[in-house]
Image (cartoon, rainbow, N blue to C red):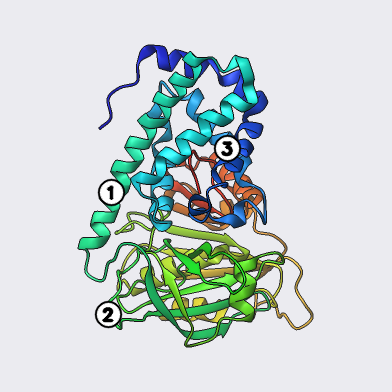
Amino acid sequence: MPRELSESTVSLVKATVPALQAHGLAITRRMYERMFQNAEIRDLFNQSHHGETGSQPQALATAVLAYAQNIDNLGALAGAVERIAQKHVGLNILPEHYPHVAEALLAAIKDVLGDAATPEILAAWGEAYWFLADILIGRESQIYSEHAAAPGGWVGWRDFIVAEKRRESDVITSFVLKPADCGKTLPHRPGQYLTLRLEVPGGAPLKRNYTISSAPGDDGYRISVKREPQGAASNWLHDQAQPGDRLKAAAPAGEFVLPETAERPVVLVSGGVGLTPMVSMLSALARQSAGEAVHFVHGALSGATHALGEEVRALAKASGGRIRTTFFYERPRAQDVQGETYDEAGLVTPEWLAQHTPLRDADYFLCGPRAFLRAFVSGLVSRGVPPSRIHYEFFGPADELLAA
């Protein structure tokens, strides 16, 4: 464990909170500009959160502010630290990469704040950065060691073959990936993702996280990818990737996972492509010969965009009533038949969950866009669900320090 932060560093970092509130985004934008001058460092990062969406600088600014605000109560950031470590392992971030981030961050603070960034302030932020970096390096080393020691595990990039490509809806296509060396693979925990490295002609390699949508196993993985209008990786996968193609993947990562044993009823709630981790979770729960009740609730625009519905229904049918499913279509088409292809018209709401699921007795797993999660997390808490029983994952960059 790293040594404790000095009292002077804690005081000085907390004193920078107003400046971060006013200039945090400018600092993180400048930090990335500096870092990405080094092509080797630039290629470590998921560029979709920079070039395609531009959302990562804002996410990092929010995270830096949270770190400063909680510098004397770092236990509040434990969940964020684990999330960062998992992402870094997926991207193969190593200890030697951390000095590049430190140099860019401190220089950016000086660039933006000018004379207000005194030597004392910069020294305090340097100490604070390395305090957190040492925690992350230690945790990441532990995860790498676990991956290396586990049956079917690996560290770094491993070659996979696209064994199957299957269109699931107008916007989602599944890809079954098998190891090129024909060896075993590390069984994922339901909810985890694969980080892919895609060698796309005419450009730098693309790195993207895609949730595993299959049940845990040791012979490969399935990802189900939504086509994004401006998504370089998703469009390449949909349009160009074919069975037999080779790509690289890091070992499964992610902290949004199903517990090993369900202690109470489980409610899986998703919107759009957010169903991918839920299908993996449902598949794992369905394998249990007995256990707590499961309710799978999913919202789609219509039958045209609803993926993996038949698979989910089959799992529910085979469960003997232990698994219940409810599908919502926001705008059903004429050929979408209520009671057959979907159950409810409109949107899933916290009110509906309160009326139809075991509200205060269940664990809730949520996955969807930010607005979806904001509505459900606050809606469930306001209805008495303990926050410890609400687990969620969202799309896009997380609000966390050093996120890639």
Name the element at disc 3: helix
What's the residue at 60%, 68% (across, down)? 233
Residue 92 % position (x, y): 39, 56
Mark 1 vs mark 2, CA separation in Å: 24 Å
Mark 2 vs mark 3, CA separation in Å: 41 Å
Judge whether 52 appears above or below 377 on screen: below
Q: Do the residues bearing badges 1 and 2 touch, measured as CB atoms within 8 Å?
A: no
- Identify the residue under disc 3: 31
Q: Classify 10 Å Cα crowding around label 1: few (below 14), some (14-19), many (20 and above).
A: some
In the rendered structure, which disc, 1 or 3, sits on the residue that comes first in sequence? 3
Q: Nearer the viewer, residue 180 or 266?
A: 180
Does residue 255 appear in the picture of this structure?
no
Name the element at disc 2: loop
Does residue 333 appear in the picture of this structure?
yes
Q: Do the residues bearing badges 2 and 3 touch, measured as CB atoms within 8 Å?
A: no
Quadrant holding the N terminus: top left
In the rendered structure, which disc, 1 or 2, sits on the residue that comes first in sequence? 1
Going by the numbered disc 2, the residue's amino acid type is Gly
- Residue farthest along the right direction in this orientation: 334
What's the residue at 32%, 42% (across, down)? 137
Residue 181 % position (x, y): 31, 81
Mark 1 vs mark 3, CA separation in Å: 25 Å
Going by the numbered disc 1, the residue's amino acid type is Ser
Label annotation for residue 183: 2
- Identify the residue under disc 1: 141
Q: Nearer the viewer, residue 339 or 82?
A: 82
Count of picture labels: 3
Q: Classify 10 Å Cα crowding around label 3: few (below 14), some (14-19), many (20 and above).
A: many
400 relative to 4 in the view: left or right: right
Residue 379 % position (x, y): 60, 44
Going by the numbered disc 3, the residue's amino acid type is Met
Q: Nearer the viewer, residue 273 or 293?
A: 273
